[in-house]
Image (tube, rainbow, N blue to C red):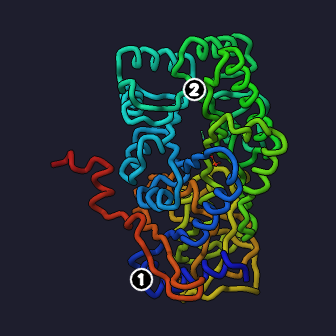
Amino acid sequence: MNPIADRRAGVLREALSAGLLHPDRAPIASFIDGATLRENVESLRRAFAGGPDVLHAFAAKAGSLPVLLRMLRELGMGAEVASEGEFEMALRAGFAGGEIVFDSPAKTNREIERALACGAQINIDNLQEFERIARRLGEGVGGDAIERSIGFRVNPQIGTGSIEAMSTAGAQSKFGVGIRDAESRSRVLEAYLRAPWMNSVHVHVGSQGVASEMMVEGIREVTALADEINGRVGAQRILTIDIGGGLPVDFQSDDGDPGFERYAAALRSEVPRLFSGDYRIVTEFGRSILAKAGFMAAFVEYTKSSGGRPIAVTHAGAHVATRTVFMPDSWPLRILPFTGSGEPKTGGEVVQDVAGPCCFAGDLIARGRSLARLDAGDIVVVPDTGAYYASTPFTYNSILAPGIYAAEWEGAGDGAVGFRPVREPQTMASLLAASGAELLG
Ligand SMILES: Cc1ncc(COP(=O)(O)O)c(C=O)c1O
């Protein structure tokens, strides 16, 4: 077997014996394999090593869990946040202001003031936000002493990938300032010439579904823009180029290579100016760091057949796999059948649906999939769900959110497994509080 699959099977067995996954008390749980997470971060650091100064900011939207953010900080990453909530989680996880990158298309005054005060990097989404920040800095908000990176998020308007909702460099994308629109290009240049505190540029061409060639193309455009601004200013005004995240993940296999080496090599060859030493680099990877480190495991509660189609009714549905259930063609996931005692189930394949517990007919995490026949009491393991699954919950039907545990191996993957809670299973009291039940008195 391959190491990711080996460790996953081991974590499942140990989670069952530790009672973290239990048919009655915890019919679904999620796990993050610490070794895979570490390998991914190390591979990212290696890929960009030996060049200019780099801050690798983990995209907190991929896994908005303070304990996970703390683990990534311990591995030397920064944090990219896109809301007040993610910002607060990053601070709780221990990130210093200068290790935080703040991206959001709708930053409020309060959020801007906080980001300025703690010295976070601010990626400005639009020209109105630029004017707002200029006013705040003019009023002395945040003080002058703090060194910070501030600049526009630029949309290079070079096209879209295969998942429309994940593509941010289309001509009409909602993010950033379109640099091919003649008027906004000249207003962006004016802003940089006018404001000496504007010292960075940011681009994020998109996420899953965008070819890495397109990402490289977008980065080439903003690097040229940075050179142009510096040329016009006649000094090194732009100090930081934030190249975003977006490296796609293979959801069809256990190939563990996130592809950072290839991506950095393509950037070195296609955009050598980025590595000239004139610019500090910031990256914002999320999915490629976390997806393959995580999996969920859920018990099959019942099985039945309808119109000749076998259906396994499990505890993994839209509440934990929202994107997969609502956009099954864009986000298909593998399903790995196991027995209730954690043994892989192979052979005897039948075409079946794997359904979740939510009350709507489309709540299926796999449709018409050929798998070993699932029986009540079996377990379905859903791999590659480390990123963007816990952070995109769907609260319909008020189903308690499962616990999430980080698994650490003693020894080289063959010792015992220690579990660190990343998020405790939701209690009924917390679910009722989140639904406003306290207003009943
Ligand atoms: C601005 C920005 N940076 C980084 C990311 C992370 O992308 P990925 O998880 O695909 O690496 C996103 C994802 O939406 C984003 O919008």
* Residue occupying image coordinates x 74% and y 60%: 250
- Asked whether the viewer can see residue 35, the reply is yes
Q: How many marks?
A: 2
Amino acid type, residue under disc 2 in the picture: Asn
Picture quadrant of residue 12 = bottom right
For the question of whether residue 175 can be seen, the reply is: no
Give whichever of 162, 200 is nearer the camera. 200
Residue 231 shown left or right of residue 27 in the figure: right
Please rate how many residues cluster around mark 1, counting C-alpha atoms within 10 Å: few if below 14, some from 14 to 19, many from 20: few
Report x, y in % for residue 428: 30, 63
Q: Secondary structure at mark 1?
A: loop
Q: Disc number at residue 19?
A: 1
In the image, 278: left or right of 93? right
Residue 244 vs 58, above or below: the answer is above
- Mark 2 Cα shell of 10 Å, populated few (<14), some (14-19), many (≥20): many
Q: Which residue is mark 2?
A: 199
